[in-house]
Image (cartoon, grey):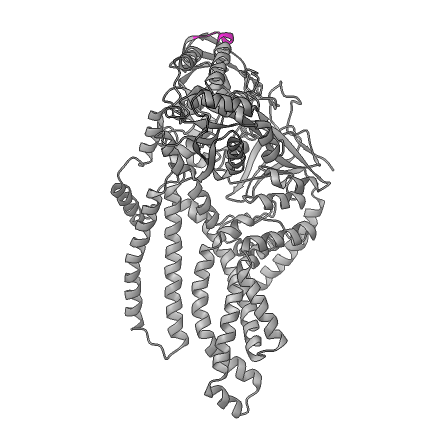
Amino acid sequence: MHWRSKLLALAVSLLFGTLLFCFAQEKTLVVAIEHDVMTLDPGNHRDRETETVIRNMFDGLVTRTPDMEIVPELAVSWERPSPNEWVFHLRDGVTWHDGTPFTAEDVKFTIDRTVKEGMIAGQTSPRKGLLGSVTGAEVIDRLTVKIITSTPWPALISFLPFHEIVPKHYVEEVGDEYFAEHPVGTGPFKFVRWDKGVQVVMERYEGYYGGSPDIPPVGPAKVDRVIFRIIPETSTRIAALRAGEVHIATRIPVDLIPEIEADPNLQVMAVRGTRSTFIEMNVTKPPFDSVLVRRAMNYAIDVDKIVDLVLAGLATPIPSLLSPDSPFYKPLEPYGYDPERARALLAEAGYPDGFELTIDCEDYLKDVAVVVAQMLRQVGIDAKVQVWEWGVLKPKLLAHERAMWITDWGNGSLDPTGIMHPKLVTGERGNYSGYSSCLYDGLFEFANNVTLDPESRKEAFHIAQEVIYYDAPMVFLYVAQEVYGVSRRVANWRPSPDSRINLHDADLMG
Amino acid sequence: MTLTYLIRRLLQAVPVFLGVTFIVFLLMYMTPGDPVDLMMGEGSVVSEEEIEQLRHELGLDRPFYEQYGRFLAGIFRGDLGNSITHRRPVATLIWERLPATIELTLLAGVIALAVAIPAGVVSAVRRYSVLDAVGSIASLIGVSMPGFWLGLILIIFFSVTLKVLPVAGRITYGTGLEPRTGFFVLDAILQGNGRALVDVLKHLIMPAFAMSVVMMAMTMRLTRSSMLEVINQDYIKTARAKGLANRTVILRHALRNALIPVVTTVALNLGSLLGGNMIIESVFAWPGLGRLVVESVYARDYPVVQGCVLVYALIYVSLNLIADLSYAYLNPKIRLE
């Protein structure tokens, strides 16, 4: 083409483009997330943002309501014919975004791909650990599939919402690498494009079966299009919200809430997350080898005040490790603030004049640590704070070289297996405090590998929470809320504790 | 002669690259933190054996010299390895991000020069005038202003208050642009897509300006002092004595000579712009290499960091070479040996 005609084409398309843009009246919901998705293959990542985006294009056997109740999605029901076998009956009439029917073959393919070694382009799925002792699956008929475990693993249902089913026929045809950038799912939205580092665009899938009947309304999505935009900088995310370019912005820090509240078009929405924050103590060495001293710490620290001062009230104090949203939560009365009792316990343990103490933490928990140090000084402990980079601190914790540190642990499944087990069972990977209790370990063994009765399992976890409550290997602090900035145009959406942003029901007004 | 010089310089670059790869590899190796540990996260049921298995698959359980050897051998095959978190080839990741960074840097350079050189000339010619004073103050502010802060101020003013420019990002969905070269301005022109071109430029202008400010201020100061030096030379006096118009004297005789040091520093400045744009890329959500590096450092994604640094080194060394060559080209008195 001659350059003049090119220029003309440019001018004409400019004009028509603008006109077209003015007449388009489609509903596009835009969500600002912090970083780009790692992949669009549900089986090949361990990343929160990636999970959030993928969940709008893929469904799982089960899902969770915004209240964290587990309900059927692609499965309609399930039973457990023997301790190591789970049979799932699948929903009929579900289609993949390319129109192919969904069957038990897809479920078997997904489970095998996740738990067997080297199944994704020669690599092992990093989500294997989220399927515990599952070893594989068998197809029984077109809509029935059996999942097999090597040990009885009752937590299976709690972990299944993390696993989206992928299409066997499509992955086998196009290969893992192509699939990771051009996904086909069974979810409410189908993939349109992924501009790396900029956005993931998806459109409503008209053939959607409607989603879980337990989460009404059932049917296709309300909005025509969803765009997940990547905006790493918090201030920029808020600016985009204020400019009306995005409708939901994630991860708003507490100190920037007023900026959103000041804008009449926006609102702040908060939800209790799934991450517990606590102070760990090295129970292998003095002074914290004494349970009296550890209880004294629990009395000396005013958790309510920390929540008010540092977190603007946006957190829930916890009496033990579990979040109150967990179905296994035991509502114990927290120790409460009682500095007199703390001093008395310290004296009883042989520390009437306190001791010197360094509280370790990462930078993001420094404000909490400073307040904690101040509170400990009130009961005669000469406490100071040291801020670390996690990569430096962790080896020292594992070697039991430090005395006290503030940290947190995420537990998306809300099952005790995801937090109480790795943090406090003897020798587990997250057990930095060196805590070891035969009773506690035995309760976990019983709950996860012995009993088949859900009530006994729950009871065992209740006792385990009491054990650590009295043994106090930690000062139990709080579960913080996660804060979102949301346009007032957004309807039928609220944030979920597991930080997923499911947009199936969401609508855009005005 | 120039050719032998070129070959010698290129050969000299080889040990520089080897040095860079070694230092980067060593630094990443010694940085505490384990990528597998960071990736596996919490709240799951992972045994130590499974973590070891993953470390083994990624080759992280090998001794330092073996890991480094594999990395070097990979480079010569054009293979930079696989990203640990993205689980894709590093070369692909870099290739996706590099055009965005280059596009932004080039525009920032153009803006910087378009403002700085005329301003520097005016400041020098009208020395001690009000214009000169304004220029001096502006350049002082420009050098001292944090890019992060300026970026946010621009966003709040032009996007939130006036709503004339997009807050961040690189392109709006729905312009119909098909990324081919990865340089969106070029893609839009090649596809004759005017709407996309306008959209891309609107996204580019704020981050490019925010990025250009420091270079603009420095280049302006340099142009001014270089001009002042040249204006007092005998040949300028001769030119004036011959009765040439002031305009001709300034532009043809003075500026051409004054620009020699400017051109060489510009090349180096572009190099540091490329490396120093991580903050601007974050503020404006620009999908460039800088952001990839920052994210990868946090995730301890060693292969990606190493690959990116290698690319930075390559660009920096090339720009350095171009600067030296252009110096000789502009000033015939200088001979390359």
The answer to whether one can see residue A338 in this image is: yes
As drawn, A219 above or below B321: above
Q: Which residue lies furthest to the bottom in this view?
A: B242
Which residue lies at the image location 57% right of the left edge and 72% below the top edge? B119
Q: Splitting the image into 4 quarters, where does residue A28 fall?
A: top right
Say how many tags the image has: 0
Which residue lies at the image location 57% right of the left edge and 48% below the top edge? B169
- Relative placement, left or right, of B34 versus A222 is left
Task: Tell me if residue A452 is in the magenta stretch.
Answer: yes
As drawn, B197 above or below A424: below
Q: Which stretch is magenta?
A: A451-456
Q: Splitting the image into 4 quarters, where does residue A494 fall?
A: top right
- Relative placement, left or right, of B112 versus A386 is right
Quadrant that contains the C terminus of chain B: bottom left
Residue B54 in the image: state x and y as whole percent. Answer: 35, 31
The answer to whether one can see residue A109 in this image is: no
Which residue lies at the image location 68% right of the left edge and 51% below the top edge? A18
Residue A118 in the image: state x and y as whole percent. Answer: 35, 29
Residue A45 in the image: state x and y as whole percent. Answer: 45, 32
For the residue pair A204 and A73, the one nearer the viewer reads as A73
For the residue pair B282 and A98, the one nearer the viewer reads as B282
Residue B185 in the image: state x and y as whole percent. Answer: 54, 56
Task: Tell me if residue A195 is in the magenta stretch.
Answer: no
